[in-house]
Image (spheres, coloured by chain):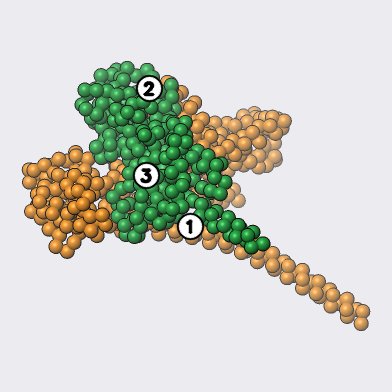
Amino acid sequence: MKTKTILVALCLYTSVNFAQKIKGSDTVLPLAQKEAETYMKTNKMAKLTVTGGGSGVGFAALVDNTTDIAMASRKIKMDEKIKLQDAGRAYKETIIAYDALSVIVNNENKVSQLTREQLEGIFTGKIKNWKEVGGDDMPMVVYSRESSSGTFEFFKEHVMNKKNYASSVLSMPATGAIVQSVSQTKGAIGYIGLAYMDKQVKALKVSYDAGKTYIAPSMATAKDKTYPVVRPLYYYYLTTVEKAVKPFVDYVLSAEGQKIVEAVGYVPLSK
Amino acid sequence: MRSILKNDLQRVKTFYKKFSERFIEGLLMLSSSITSLTVVLIVVFLFKEGIGLFNQKPVEQGYVIAINKNNKVKKLSSAQLKNIYDQKIAHWSEVGGTNDSIVLFQMEDISNYFSDEQIGDQLQNLPTCLNKLLDSLPNIIAFLPEKYINKDFKGTILDVNKVSLADFFGGKEWIPTAKPSAQLGVLPLILGTLWVSLGAILLALPLGLAAAVYMSEIADSRIRRIMKPLIELLAGIPSVVYGFFGLVIIVPLIQKTFNLPVGETGLAGSIVLGIMALPTIITISEDAMRNTPRAMKEASLALGASKWQTIYKVVIPYSISGISAGAILGIGRAIGETMAVLMVTGNAAVIPHTILAPVRTIPATIAAELGETSNGGLHYKALFALGCILFLITLFINLTVEFISNRRKYNKH
């Protein structure tokens, strides 16, 4: 009898302890779901719930203490850091995988490479025709994600030098919609995560050294860090819950967890 | 004795009957008042949040724009701030200052000037660092959190105007996430919404009317029995399905037909919305036409009018109020639709000069952006203000319906 109650209490304790919430970036969402599923299969006691909403949503939840782990496809912003500081919470940051952001065009487009400066010109609206970057004489149609996306912010910060997108840029509600639109529009250009790449569209080689070397995005170039537009994917958690979330985070970082990263289509951490 | 008992029983029975009637009446009244109260509450909430926008500055709450104390510039508009940070304005002379180039600073740039140790792990030295920075660079413009400004701050804090009605309704740029100063011009969004809705109604009205005439006057009952549920089924398809259909079928079709650089246009939105408005238009106007009294139609035919003349001169004039109600409710649906439009119109916030260009509508903007806004912030309130505009447009449409149907009734009697 006594042992039974202790066992029940223990079960309750651990299940309460492990009912963790993971919230944030839609880019990380498919990966986190897969990781959580396999983790729960091997650890029957563990309970994880994964929800999306965007990187900003994850950080907001971390500030409000409504999530245990915040997923993010960008680094924490200064004002989010300040909010956490005000709330008196310390956090830890872990990189769980990498993603290579690919710039894509229609398969019929002759242009196969662009420099960062040219990309900035295209997305801020300075360059409007493909002939300005060595292509045919046709107007450019620029696709982007909606502003809620972490990818939108990352691209603005790292490719566009923090300048604002031109208001003529078409914004699509999902990455899949960008692939669809680029595949059916001749003058189109857009950006997507490596996991969404397929044969319907062509990925451009990108140069970050003013045209000296152009690198194509792929799992290999992202792994050896020669491709310039690689972004880390993060987990953020508060130090107060570190004990509870550590086993799962460690699992994601383990060899088994990193295998899932590659299977989902992101770049595993190099050992 | 027995009769008294019977009488009592009767009285109790009628009492219960009355009571239950009263109870049901009360229940009905309660439910209708709850419904109206909910509507009123939602409207009050919408306007309260929306109007709050005009009490706010376009710069994020808790942040200030600061410059060096020797700088002559005292005031910058929201658009100037955005252009400065986009490096479209590169010299102070363009905004009334000296001929030096502007040095931009945001909190993320702090690591270029100070190391983490200098700032301190609890950010305790941040105010001193910022103070030093503002003092040492004469041409700096800095976007800073207010609480890291200490008392002996050596820079000047710039005054930024509140969001004005003129900026909101007359502004041509909608970039609510622009840092440091949000650009909240809704003109492109309002025009986009009206363009798409107008196109939808121009496409759907003739088609819907034709179908309604056919079904009510020409088709035999067997065809009608198949067609009517089929058309009503159109109303039950989720809008995201229409959106995907539009993106994969209609968008490439428009691009090829008109030889455009891009197929995601206002027209694509109009076609999808036109299809979505069809069931409303057809059902309501068909019902109105079928309500034409048989006697009137037979009188017309007896006078020697042909079937077409009867439809044209008797049925349509008789049911015109129902037809206009159907058309206007159809537009109402088109104006408020979010998901389908979000997928096919391209959502570029530029003022459309033709229906063959990408447009961004109000509902699509709210749907796409509300998720990322922080509760009570500037962007959140701006989206609620957009909701108010949409509400007023729909209200205007509904009042028009009321007016038209009332006037018609009055004419008849």
What residue appears at the point 36 percent right and 33 percent down from the top-left corner?
A270
Q: Amino acid at mark 3?
A: Thr
Q: Decide: marks 1, 3 in contact (CB < 8 A)?
A: no
Q: Is residue B196 left or right of residue A9?
A: left
- Inspect this view and state whether residue B185 appears: no
Q: Is residue B152 left or right of residue B320?
A: left
Q: Amino acid at mark 2?
A: Lys
Could you give the CA–CA distance between mark 1 and mark 3, rounded to whole angstroms?
A: 43 Å
Could you give the CA–CA distance between mark 1 and mark 2, rounded to whole angstroms?
A: 48 Å
Quarter of the image for residue A185 reads top left
Quarter of the image for residue A83 reads bottom left
Q: Is residue B127 left or right of residue B198?
A: left
Residue position for label 2 = A202
Residue B273: give x, y in percent of width and height: 49, 36
Q: Which mark is residue B332?
A: none
Q: Nearer the viewer, mark 1 or mark 3?
A: 3
Could you give the CA–CA distance between mark 2 and mark 3, rounded to whole angstroms?
A: 32 Å
Residue position for label 1 = B42
Residue position for label 3 = A94
What residue appears at the point 53 percent right and 39 percent down from the top-left corner?
A38
